[in-house]
Image (spheres, rainbow, N blue to C red):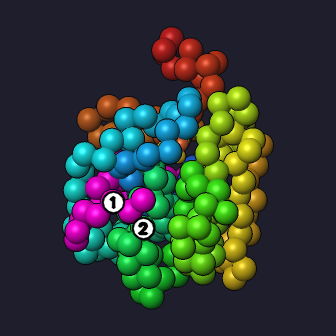
Amino acid sequence: MVKDYGEYFNLAHIEASSHIYGPGERFVVWFQGCKLACKGCWNREMWSFKSKQLIHKERLLEIILTTSNIKGVTFLGGEPMHQANSLWWLINQIRERTNLTIFLFTGYEQNELAQLGQLSNILENCDIVALGRYDENKKNINQQWIGSNNQIVIYPAGSRESEQPELINQVEIIIEADESIRILGFPDESLIKVMIIN
Ligand code: SF4
């Protein structure tokens, strides 16, 4: 299961500031590579394990540690568990040096994580975990943080977070200095129409 990029992470994307991937303002890291192949996955471009954005582990840590005003760090993908060794190194460094909370999204179920030997790491080091495959037959874009009703959000014992997901569809629209626009999240069709018209 573990894909080894040595001293590097293979990432799809980074957002230094987002408000829709967990409580408060958060640094968000999308991993590149997922073999779980959920039917209807909205991030298929993140399935490939080819190098997309290789970043040295120490460099990513430095960027996170020098980012102001964030409450925590969120990891999603792709599948973060495919780069578990580097992920746990990074999370341990963050927890040792800061009070930033950790939110992990994984497509694995709890029993699978136990079989992979990853469940105890998750329960000891994460504040919030969104678990389970995306199931397009149970799609729900009006549930904060998850995409289908079979997925669950858990707060391991000792979690420093208590904010619960709401029944809302959150989308973040980022307008860059050069006036280019990026959309985070999955807007429903009515919002897409409004954006196209405008
Ligand atoms: S686990 Fe996530 S990224 Fe991987 S196939 Fe499923 S929905 Fe897509």
Q: Could you tell me which residue is drawn at 39 percent across and 41 percent down?
A: 47
Q: What's the amino acid at mark 2? A: Ala
Q: Could you tell me which residue is drawn at 33 percent across and 60 percent down?
A: 3
Q: Is disc 2 placed on a helix, strand or loop?
A: helix
The region drawn magenta spans 1-19
Q: Quadrant of residue 128?
A: bottom right
Q: Determine contact: label 2, label 1, CB under 8 Å.
A: no
Q: Quadrant of residue 115?
A: bottom right
The answer to which of 26 and 132 lies nearer the viewer is 132
Compute the Cα span from label 2 to label 1: 8 Å
Residue 36 in the image: state x and y as whole percent. Answer: 50, 45
Q: Is residue 57 visible?
A: yes
Mark 2 or 1: the one toward you? 1
Q: Is residue 15 visible?
A: no
The residue furthest front is 115
Tell me the number on the disc at residue 149. none
Q: Could you tell me which residue is drawn at 76 percent across and 49 percent down?
A: 166
Is residue 73 located in the magenta-colored stretch of the structure? no
Q: Could you tell me which residue is drawn at 29 percent across and 40 percent down?
A: 177
Residue 117 in the image: state x and y as whole percent. Answer: 54, 73
The answer to which of 195 and 149 lies nearer the viewer is 149
Tell me the number on the disc at residue 3. 1
Ranked by sequence position, the earlier of labels 2 and 1 is 1
Q: What's the amino acid at mark 1? A: Lys
Can you say which quadrant of the picture contains the N terminus?
bottom left
Q: Work out whether 5 lies above or below 195.
A: below
User: Would you name the residue on which mark 2 appears?
Assistant: 84
Q: Is residue 17 left or right of residue 24?
A: left
Residue 95 in the image: state x and y as whole percent. Answer: 48, 82
Residue 85 in the image: state x and y as whole percent. Answer: 38, 72
